[in-house]
Image: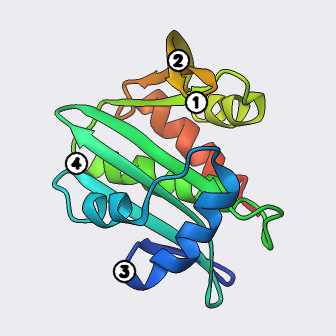
Amino acid sequence: MGVSGTTAVREMGPSDLDQVMEIERVTFATPWAREVFEDEMGAPGRSYLVARYGSRVVGYGGVMVVADDAHINTLATVRPAPVPAVGTRLMLALVDRGLEAGAEYLTLEVRTSNRRAQEFYRKFGMAPVGVRKHYYQDDDALVMWAHDIGGADYQARLHRIRDALP
């Protein structure tokens, strides 16, 4: 997938799940069960990736492609990250997976209270299009989309993001 210094982004495998579950539990109020990741990793149209720093998983993410939509299912990193831009590297790799599968749109849900994540996704050209009430047990979800991700303007955005990586 991609390597930067000693940070590598690659396919998530069963041997990564112990570390992924540690990050999942400290990141999310309602973490996914291990079985969800096991099922998702083998499901058609899905791609789950990990970012590794040496032997340590420092982030992970997943994308599901249905028709021309690439839906970011999850994205999380260790806090504080031992290396910069782990989330950005993962997001770029997930977008690449969507593009490889022919997606034209990028979408996700994010907590309405998570302004930091919303700003991160805006960097990827994602804009709010609606709210899903009670999507989370304790919060609503902001639905964000990016359109025409295969187009020249979006490709230029991805190029700028890659060029700015440390």
Q: First in sequence: mark 1 or mark 2?
A: 1
Give x and y (percent) for residue 111: 63, 28
Q: Position of residue 146 (x, y in %)?
A: 46, 25
Q: Is 76 or 146 nearer to us in this picture? A: 76
Q: What x and y, as percent, mark residue 21?
A: 54, 68
Placement of 30 over or under 26, stated as above or below: above
Callout 4 crowding tier (Cα within 10 Å): few <14, some 14–19, many ≥20: some
Report how far apart the C-alphas of labels 3 and 2 lie in the structure: 32 Å
Q: Which residue is mark 1?
A: 110
- Residue, disc 3: 14
Residues at marks 1 and 2, CA–CA distance in whole angstroms: 12 Å
Q: Nearer the viewer, mark 1 or mark 2?
A: 2
Query: Does dot 4 land on a helix, a strand or a loop?
Result: loop
Gap between marks 4 and 2, in whole Å? 31 Å
Q: Are marks 4 and 2 in contact (CB under 8 Å)?
A: no
Q: Which one is earlier in the sequence, the residue at label 4 or at label 1?
A: 4
Task: Judge depth for marks 3 and 2 and give the one in front.
Answer: 2
Sequence-wise, which precedes: disc 4 or disc 2? 4
Q: Which mark is residue 101?
A: 4
Q: In the visual, does 121 lie left or right of 12?
A: right
